[in-house]
Image (spheres, rainbow, N blue to C red):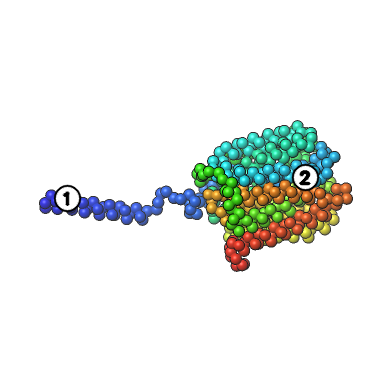
Amino acid sequence: MTPSSASASAMSDEAQKDSGMRDTEKMQPSTATNPWDPSAFPDGGTEAWLVVLGAFCAMFVSFGWIGAIGVFQEHYQLNQLRSYSPSEVAWIPAVESFFMFIGGSWVGRMQDLYGPRWLLPIGTFLHVFGLMMASISKKYYQFLLSQAICSGIGTSMIFYPAAACLATWFMKKRAAAFGLAACGSGLGGILFPIIVVRLIEDIGFAWTMRTCAFLILFLMIIACLTVKSRIPPQKTPVKATDFVKPLAEMPFLLLSLSMFFTFVGLFVPFIFIPIEAYANGMGAMNSVYLLSVLNAVSILGRTLPAPLADKYGRFNVVIIMSWLTAIFTLAIWIPANSNAVRWVYAAFVGLSSGTIVSMGPALAAQISDVRQVGVRTGTMYMFVAVAVLIGNPIGGALVTDNHTNYRNLKIFAGVLMVAGSVTLMAARVSISGLKLAAKV
């Protein structure tokens, strides 16, 4: 064999090896998996479930606190701020709720850019500091600045990063994961009213607020250590259009409008059910327990429908629960003339509304690119923020007969819930058309 033929043979063998290696590489899966690909979501595992635990704690102290602030409407109206009307007092929980939800517009964007590393500790400080300052407040404006604004901003910086991070770990089990984490808000809504009322009797208002602040601090230490995003932050410029652009999509616009109408009506019983019952003869302690019952049963609403939502469609399940909430309000709460009926209403509306509250982020995530979940969830909750800001003061202004007749307030809440249900149905139609059996 000549040197040239040997060289050619060697080159041929080398080419065959290279070809074989390339064929083998084609057969093997890529190691650089796209983190946004549905198959890349772990849907379980230690890290993912630790994020659920952290989100549970975060939602306990944020949405759970907001769900329980109806107890302060009653307390302030009967004590420190008794010279103010129900509508004026309602601005305190309304502004606090507003700042929690409106923060989604910028907290969601900051989450997309930088992740939860700094947002959660800063939110913890503001929430705790606000409640500490509320503990020494005496005047109306002081409660607004401390509890409504400072604490409200803190809850926003806690809630949105937890919800957005959770969405990066789950795809097929997303509704179930959100349902479990949202149980934290339900449990917070159960315990905070009882803690506040019991401790006010034993140690006074000031130390009650400080005790709640220390409890929040402890739970947020757990959240700060466990909540993280699976997907790296997106270092893209912040533009105002980032918040407006999603509204050009009809399904997202209708979903946001649905959340607006629903939450205008939904937060009315969350705030006024204790004081309405007290004004109509129920004992002060039992009236607060109404709020705890509502939040307790809402845990079932957050968890039991979640697997059904993953199986049959999240929009389908939430539409059913939205209609039930409206029907319960119109058919049970409006004609309620006894304490027993009020207990029934609190339980029923807690069950149905729990699904709406917990599934909101999952609905937004379903019709969003996962890379934009944070900012799009925030955009949706901007609508919710305006809803909770105006709903309760309007409802409070509808109370008549020296703050004892709440019939007009109840009608207002029920009608807005109906509007929310109709709009959510329109959102579903914009996604799948008139296919009733479609999984949406």
In this orientation, does residue 17 appear?
A: yes
Mark 1 crowd level (few <14, some 14–19, many ≥20, 10 Å Cα) = few
Instruction: Please provide percent x and percent y for residue 280.
Output: 86, 50
Amino acid type assigned to the residue bearing label 1 in the image: Ser
Q: Position of residue 54 (x, y in %)?
A: 59, 43
Q: Position of residue 434 (x, y in %)?
A: 61, 67
Between circles 1 and 2, the one closer to the viewer is 2
In the displayed orientation, state which residue is furthest to the top.
Answer: 136
Q: Which mark is residue 7?
A: 1
* Residue placed most toward the observer, 224 or 146: 146
- Please name the amino acid that badge 2 sits on: Ala
Image position, residue 26 (x, y; %): 35, 55
Q: Is residue 179 above or below residue 426?
A: above
- Which SS class for mark 2? loop
- The reply, left or right, for residue 62 in relation to residue 174 is right
Residue at 77 percent of width and 47 percent of height: 393
Q: Is residue 1 above or below residue 126?
A: below
Q: Secondary structure at mark 1?
A: helix
In the picture, the disc for residue 145 is none
Q: Which residue is mark 2?
A: 90
Residue at coordinates 80% horizontally, 46% vertically from top-left? 87
Q: Residue at 65% across / 49% down in the picture?
A: 381
